Image (cartoon, helix red, strand yellow):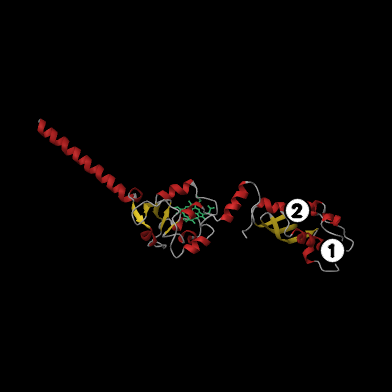
Amino acid sequence: MNKFAYSAFIAFLASIGTLVSVHALSSDDETDGASETRDITLDELAEHASAESCWKAIHGGVYDITDYVPDHPTEEEVILEWCGRESSEAWDNKSPGRPHSPGAERQLENYRIGDLVDDQGEPLSGDVEDTSADAERQDASPAASVSPAEDQRLHRAMLGQPMDGHYRGVFTDRGEIQVNITFDLRDGHLTDVNFRHLAYRGVDYLTLEEGDDLYPVMVQHRRITEWLEGEPLTTIFALYEPARVVDEVDGFSGATLRGAKVISAMRDGLNRGVYSWP
Ligand code: HEM
């Protein structure tokens, strides 16, 4: 092969090589939408607010998660309500104060189609004020934002102080649930203290009627709950000496009561954590 033919052959091979790699790159782009992003405004985002086409803006990125919705580990409504909207707060608070995992973040990146911008094309990093008609509903949603009350709860939790909320706890002995108590905490004070169950050796105290032998003991327990109403949580420790709290009823003295069981059930509730929010 002469020199000219050899150079032409090499040039031919090189151009084939270039064509192959350009094709490979462009077909990569077709299959991997994540690498091709563009600017998207809130208005355009809002056009994709349904299960048929669900886009979300999260911390400056816009994601088309239509295909992912059926795979999300909750009822579809939980994430469908955020389609077409700026959703950073919801993303950061799956439940109040609990962000999505790093694994979820990696997954999210597969669905990136663009960057959120304002009408002038300036990037919007997230936490955009939602002016849509749904904004009010969004604010009312527990996952939407951390309200000052929520913030205070989280602070109390971080300090190891019990959070405001509704609690349920039990005292069990030898397989028998003897005390099941519910109460609310507000600013560290007790309200709505009630027995859901109160029993000893097979006797269900809550069903006792006036005239029953142990009826006065049930009355004394009711007095405990009345006495606790509005008191600071620390007051429960006074129940170690129930005579300080409950007077004699029909010959049964405060000493008959096992206030320690009530304390134990309440502390069980506190250990379990908030059962539901007020
Ligand atoms: C923006 C609205 C969204 C809300 C309100 C939301 C809410 C939730 C909730 C309530 C859970 C289950 C609770 C739990 O893990 O204990 C969850 C889990 C999860 N979500 Fe979402 N989600 C949203 C968007 C997304 C998106 C867009 C993706 C991914 C593309 C995603 C991926 C996941 C994954 C992988 C989990 C399993 C737990 C984890 O890895 O954090 N979510 N989400």
Can the viewer see residue 174?
Answer: no
* In-front residue for pair 258/247: 247
Name the quarter where the C terminus is drawn.
Answer: bottom right
Dot 1 beta carbon under 8 Å from ligand 1: no
Q: Which residue is mark 1?
A: 216
Say whether marks 1 and 2 touch (CB < 8 Å).
no
Which of the 4 quarters of the picture holds residue 42? bottom left
**For the residue marked with disc 2, what is the amino acid?**
Thr
Compared across the picture, whether 157 is left or right of 70 comes to right
The residue at the point 24 percent across, 43 percent down is 20
Inspect the image, locate mark 1, and give the three-letter code of the amino acid beneath it: Pro
Classify mark 1: residues with Cα within 10 Å, few (<14), some (14-19) or many (20+): many
Of badges 1 and 2, nearer the viewer stands 2
Categorize mark 2 by other alpha carbons within 10 Å: few (<14), some (14-19), many (20+). Answer: few
Instruction: Name the residue located 60 percent from the left edge and 49 percent from the top edge.
Output: 155
Residue drawn at 37 percent across, 60 percent down? 43
**How many discs appear?**
2
Instruction: Give the alpha-carbon distance from disc 1 to disc 2, as whole Å.
Output: 23 Å
Task: Report helix, strand or loop for mark 1.
Answer: helix
- Residue 128 drawn at (x, y percent): 43, 55
Residue 218, percent from left and from top:
81, 62
Question: Percent x, y for residue 135?
Answer: 47, 62
* Extreme residue in the right direction: 251
Percent from the top left, x then y, of residue 84? 41, 60
User: Which residue has dot 2 on it?
Assistant: 235
Judge whether residue 57 can be spotted in this image: yes
Q: Secondary structure at mark 2?
A: helix
Residue 157's place in the image compared with 69, above or below, is: above
Q: Looking at the image, which residue sits at the far front?
A: 120
**On-image quarter of the N terminus:** top left
